[in-house]
Amino acid sequence: MNILILGSGGREHALAWKIKQSPKSGKIFIAPGNGGTHKVATNLDLDIKNFDKVGEAIKAHEIDMLVVGPEDPLVEGIVDHFRADKDFKKLKIIGPTAKGAMLEGSKEYAKEFMKRHNIPTADARTVTKENLEETLKYMERLDPPYVLKADGLAGGKGVIITEELEEARKSLRNLIEDRKFGQASEKVLLEQFLKGIEVSFFVITDGKDYRILPEAKDYKRIGERDTGLNTGGMGAVSPVVFADRAFKEKVNERIIRPTVQGLKKEKIDYCGFIFFGLINVGGDPYVIEYNVRMGDPETEVVLPRIKTDFLELLLAAADNNLVDTEIEYERFTASTVMYVSRGYPEFYEKGHEISVGDLKTVLPFHAGTKLQDGKLVTNGGRVIALTGLGKNLGEALSKAYAGGREINWEGKKFREDIGFDLKALGQ
């Protein structure tokens, strides 16, 4: 069968790499793809927010399955668009409708959903221009740290955490009045700070049943020891040492099952992935956020650990038949290190030529790269994720960092402490 994957990052590269391993896969296309995806698929130069152009590509290439990688097209209703068109009646689509995508599209909506279904999460207050001054005074009564989250999509960068009251108040004004993240910060959530260690869980669901994928832990901050600005992700590891059987059972019973049942109860048509950004507070899981797609760079460590035919899982979800499937994990550890452009996540340059040596010990998943005049050049803040596999975390990380010495460009940056907190826990 022919498959079209929408997106241009490391997540989409990893999805194509994994799907290609299935004997059921035919031609794989990625739109728009990047400088590395052409090795596992055919790149299509498409604006993925132009649904009519995507439809033309689906017809031209006789696509049987559409896999939507990033969140923007989902929130904007790409699934609804094709479901409403009789010409695409047979098209299998992996991704929720716009209503389901609101779990990521609005943090306020997600909080209300969790309240309705008794899913544990931090308390939060919605802030707008109308109650800004009142909230600024209210913050004086709160204990730090202060957590501010833009309500809408902000590319993984819409969260501010600070210990300083005045800094928090200034940031809140900046978000609301100066619209730091545009429409995404017209509303801001002032959220209770939960102290613990983060972990990400993922499921594939057909809206009724679900299968839990390997868990992961990612590292959002740009600086060593989790300091500095939030990014889209600087690295990830899987499995996670503290996510033992007892913790996983709590996650399933308290969070995953009530979420899927809540979607079904509210008659929300949902076929695709759910990402649960969680925090472990004294052994109890709480939801920090939902995503309605796979995370990046978590995908780059989760997919290598899925032993089951991944395309078979996607087909079962699209056919509302996950109940008859099983999922098996690989026993090894996977770690990925994201190599980024100098200046990221703020201003960074593009167009630097990338030199590539021997990457045989890692799985290279391109993110911000492109081919220009026959040369591979940087084309984004996060340039490439290198994934190492090993019998333990140390071995996997050693491979990921060794791979990093084989790829270079002007201004290459990376974190040298991915997995530092898990090493301290004995992983």
Image (cartoon, grey):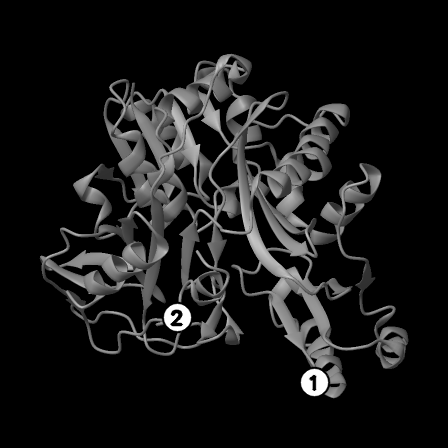
State the mark number for residue 48.
none
Amino acid of disc 2: Asp
Q: Relative to 89, is 22 above or below?
A: below
Q: Relative to 383, is 20 above or below?
A: above
Percent of width and height locating residue 30? 30, 39
Asked where in the image residue 66 lies, by quadrant, the reply is: top left
Is residue 319 rendered to the left or right of residue 180? Answer: left
Q: Relative to 263, is 356 above or below?
A: below
Percent of width and height locating residue 135? 86, 73
Amino acid of disc 1: Glu
Q: Relative to 143, is 70 above or below?
A: above
Percent of width and height locating residue 323? 55, 15
State the mark number for residue 417.
2
Asked where in the image residue 271 lies, by quadrant, the reply is: top right
At label 2, counting other C-alpha atoms closer than 10 Å, the crowd grade (few under 14, some 14-19, many 20 or more) is some
CA gap, disc 1 and disc 2: 27 Å
State the mark number for residue 167.
1
Residue under the point 81% across and 40% down:
118
